[in-house]
Image (tube, rainbow, N blue to C red):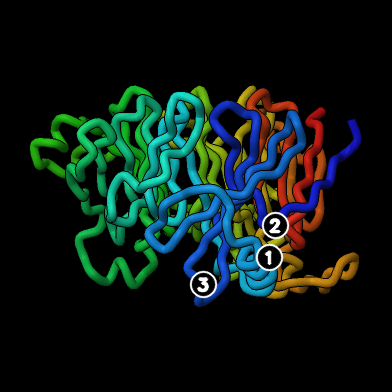
Amino acid sequence: MAEQVIPLHAPISALSPDGRSIYSYVYHSPGREFYFIDIYNFYDHSLKTLELDSARNIGNLKHMDSKNEARAYSLDDRTLLSRVKFDKNGKFLIARSKLYFIDGKGNIVGKPITDQNIDGNFTNDDKYLLISHSCGVGVFDLVALNFVKEMKVCEHPEDVRAGRELTEGRLANDENRLFIFTVDDVEVYNFDVLDMERGNGLSKKSLIYKTGNEKGKAGTSLYQGDFFPGSTSINPSEKLIAGGLVIYQQPKPISVKGQPSVGWVRDFVTGKIQYQLTGQRFGIFQTEFSPDEKYLATRGDTTGSSKCSASDLDGNPPKSSFGDGTLALRDVKTGKILKKYSNACYGPVFSKNGKQLMYSDYQFRLHIIDTP
């Protein structure tokens, strides 16, 4: 099938758990009380918009004029956008830092579960939500619906100033290993949820490996670049970890056959690098494994004056002098780029069977592409 291009009001953010729809980022206008989420259905090609009021209650669209205004503002200022997230089993949704139930028919229950702002990663069994905090990871019990504990990752306040405020946690399927992703490195710990509930935090004794401890050929620290939220991912069978890096501040990035490395793929258990990722200028902002584990999609750096940094006239995107704004579809076994797509500003998202790859361009158009 030829590539499909579908105009939407906002860029794509997440696939629905049943795989039938794609949800957009939350978008809004400055000074307005209303927020919006678009839902595009692949089967009947319908487009539905949900509205969030000032109390973050979700319901049907009521303010069409505010919606159109919100799209115009979002094209001009993309910091107004925020991602949505689902759990694996379709029981919960996070939108605009609020947590919602999803009922048995797949409908979002309108009122947030808690008044507190929440963002993070769900465990596969839907028991816990690992919440991103400054210099640590919080744990929210999805059964008891309360906060369990915050685990500190760094001991010194200066670590926050050094960039570790973007701490993100993910728990392995066996719940015995905790992965901590910070701006600077990946840390993996032996982990016991019950031990954590007793009040015990992370310790150096439980550390399995830490990428920041690695040494280069000259014996110096093997620091390749910075991670961004979404630039790290784990494949479904938990055999591989992908890490996209931003390297424009690296004076001497690691080189592979004359090309700078902008990321890596590691063994899930040992942390050993399987191969370096090359072919995308200055870095990778987002990585995603396909559900069938055949492919790895990586979205390039889109900062600075790239095509994705501001609103643009139709058919006349600005010249890019920083980053490349490309989406690369790679062979998961080798990292080799099979196909590259331009003007990829948001995504990637794979279909549930892995046969389609999706992204949004600088005008928020949805692109749907068949994988090889």
Separation (CA) of disc 3 from disc 2 = 17 Å
Q: Secondary structure at mark 1?
A: helix
**Residue 332 visible in the snapshot:** no
**Residue 27 visible in the snapshot:** yes
Separation (CA) of disc 3 from disc 1 = 12 Å
Separation (CA) of disc 1 from disc 2 = 8 Å
Question: How many residues crowd around disc 1 within 10 Å: few (fewer than 14), some, or many (20 or more)?
Answer: few
Q: Earlier in the sequence, mark 1 or mark 2?
A: 2
Which residue does the numbered mark 3 point to in the structure image? Answer: 32
Q: Is residue 196 left or right of residue 327?
A: left
**Proximity of marks 3 and 2: CB atoms separated by less than 8 Å:** no
Observer-nearest of 149 and 201? 149
Residue 90 location (% of width, % of height): 47, 29
Q: Secondary structure at mark 3?
A: loop
Residue 270 location (% of width, % of height): 41, 31
Which residue does the numbered mark 1 point to in the structure image? Answer: 68
Q: Is residue 16 left or right of residue 298?
A: left
**Proximity of marks 1 and 2: CB atoms separated by less than 8 Å:** yes
Which residue does the numbered mark 2 point to in the structure image? Answer: 9
Q: Residue at x 56, y 39 (%)?
A: 265
